[in-house]
Image (spheres, rainbow, N blue to C red):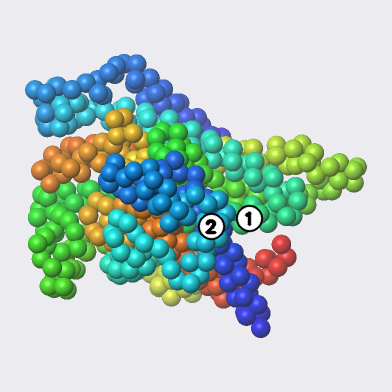
Amino acid sequence: MRLTVWLASRLLRLLLVLLSVAAVSFGLMMLSPIDPVDAYLGPQMAQVSPEQRTLIAERWGFNTPASVQFHHWLQQLLSGELGWSHIYNQPVSDVINQRFQRSFFLLLSAWLLSLILGVVLGIAAGSKEGSLLDRLISGYAYITASMPTFWLAMLALLLFSVTLGWTPTCCAGPTGVLSQEVTLLTQLHHLLLPTLTLALLGVATITLHTRAKMAAFMRSDTALHAFAQGASRFDIAWRHGLRHASLPAITLAFASLGELFGGSILIEQVFAYPGLGQATVAAGLRSDVPLLLAIALFTALFVSVGNLIADGLYQWADPRIARDRTNE
Amino acid sequence: MNSQPRLVAAGYAGVFGLLVLLLLSSSLWLGDSPLHMQFGARLMPPSAEHWLGTDALGRGLWARTLAGLALSFGVGLSAALLGTLIALSLASLAMLSPILDALVSLLIDTLLSVPHLILLLLIAFALGGGTQAVIIAVALTHWPSLARLLRAELLSLRNAPYVAISKGFGKRQGFIVWHHLLPHVLPHCLVGALLLFPHAILHEAALTFLGVGLDPTQPAIGVLLADAMRYLTGGYWWLGVFPGLGLLLMVLAIERFASMLRKAL
């Protein structure tokens, strides 16, 4: 019963947040100094007469007040119509569908890899605070946390693709080959470096978080008791610490989906990987408003669901949190 | 026991301040060299004459990297200060009435649910790019996490006995927020601004790298690295390595300084 109430209130909240994401991003697009007719016409804007321009504005409703346009857009959105992307010349939903399919594997594997690596490194570092291993791992985590995402990707590209020649320098498949004919192995080969760099960046926050949890656990009475019973440090870390530290790490991983997606935008740009991140940049640079709006909403949904799962995990694992919240 | 971290922080602050001064004054002693082209020395590798090498137009990378760092520092600092100001004003506004509180919370949730970089792209797009747009965009995307922190802090303060007494004297909510609550969270703001700072710098560089941030004629780190991307496959490694390394070192220094200050305060 309590769970259903909680879920219902969170879903309502999610809807409210999505609606305000729609309003905020639509408002931002309205603020833009770029003329929507120019954006629609692209390079052909010089060849169009003023009369035709008014016709275009009328056809697409650019001359109506912003509130009417917003209302219209929302109605379209609710009926599943996301609009037309003029830079890819196909429906926005198709663009997102194709692009997200390509990004999905990249995001998922990087996410899993960073979670596993982060937990392992965090437990290794936190189980003996102040040891050489701890200092090495924390140092590594601090450095990657301050590193520009795209720069790490550039360094990886420079080392592994340009200098050593182990991995391809760009794209999702070899140039001049149809995407249907690219084998799975080649696809994976092209994904290898982007995935690794994206994962390495996510590792830092999870490592530091897990390390702090683990170090606190090692100072706790539970650990002291286990030590007194003669258990080894490895034993304690493995049997007790892992359970203590892994749930917060999983929760954190769900809560930081936004950062993961932001990282993928930069990484796809560096590796010229034709995923959703690259489409986002293209839409921003070439003012494809419908695509940009749809991507903002899509990623907000993605991130909110991640946050919802993180919150649910917390509730499930620690009932005290639910109680605190009702007291507020 | 408490004096040692303070001493370390003071020493660190001295070195840090000196570096910042040197960086900020770099435009004086570098002159126009970040933009000066030498067509006889294009794409030269690092040497005694060109410390970090030169780019495709024969501009010295040493001077350009320093100028880029100074630019990033300035933009990052302005954005962090502006973001802190927004966070503080909205968090205290939320204290005035439950309706305002709900609205501010909704705004925080909304902005936090869109990935930073996408929101940045949207805002930079709405404002049309350029230095000012980047500062505003970074400030607008970075205030929510700090505001959430400040709001929680203010909420716990609101139940303090002295606030109840003040309320008993018939003081208005606005008076209480301004005179009793705000002075308490100001130190949090300082630390918050310092913690926002490195994020602001990294996001500015990312935005500029993608081509929607600072003007490409400016020697910003993002511009230098976007330039380097074009020559990366040709093996001109110094173009990509040094500007990024400079940025990493600067962000790392600020990050360490901020966490040291937080411990010392």
- Residue under numbered circle 2: A70
- Is residue A301 among the parts visible in the rendering? yes
Considering the image in quadrants, where does the N terminus of chain A appear? bottom right
In the picture shown, does residue B264 fall above or below B95? above
- In the structure shown, which secondary structural element does the residue marked by tag 2 occupy? helix
The image's mark for residue B105 is: 1
Residue type, numbered disc 1: Ser
| Quadrant housing the C terminus of chain A | bottom right
Q: Horizontal and vertical percent for residue B117?
A: 41, 51
Q: What residue sits 23% from the left and 48% below the top?
A: A154
Report the amino acid beneath label 2. Phe
Residue A281 % position (x, y) = 33, 51
Residue occupying the point 65% across, 77% down: A5
Front residue of B119 and A235: B119
Label 1 Cα crowd, 10 Å radius (few <14 / some 14-19 / many 20+): some
Query: Is residue B250 in sight in this rendering?
Result: no
Query: In the rendered view, would you say B138 is above or below A120?
Result: above
- Give the residue displayed 61% in from the left and 70% down from the top: A12
In which quadrant of the rendered view does residue B255 lie? top left
Chain on which label 1 sits: B
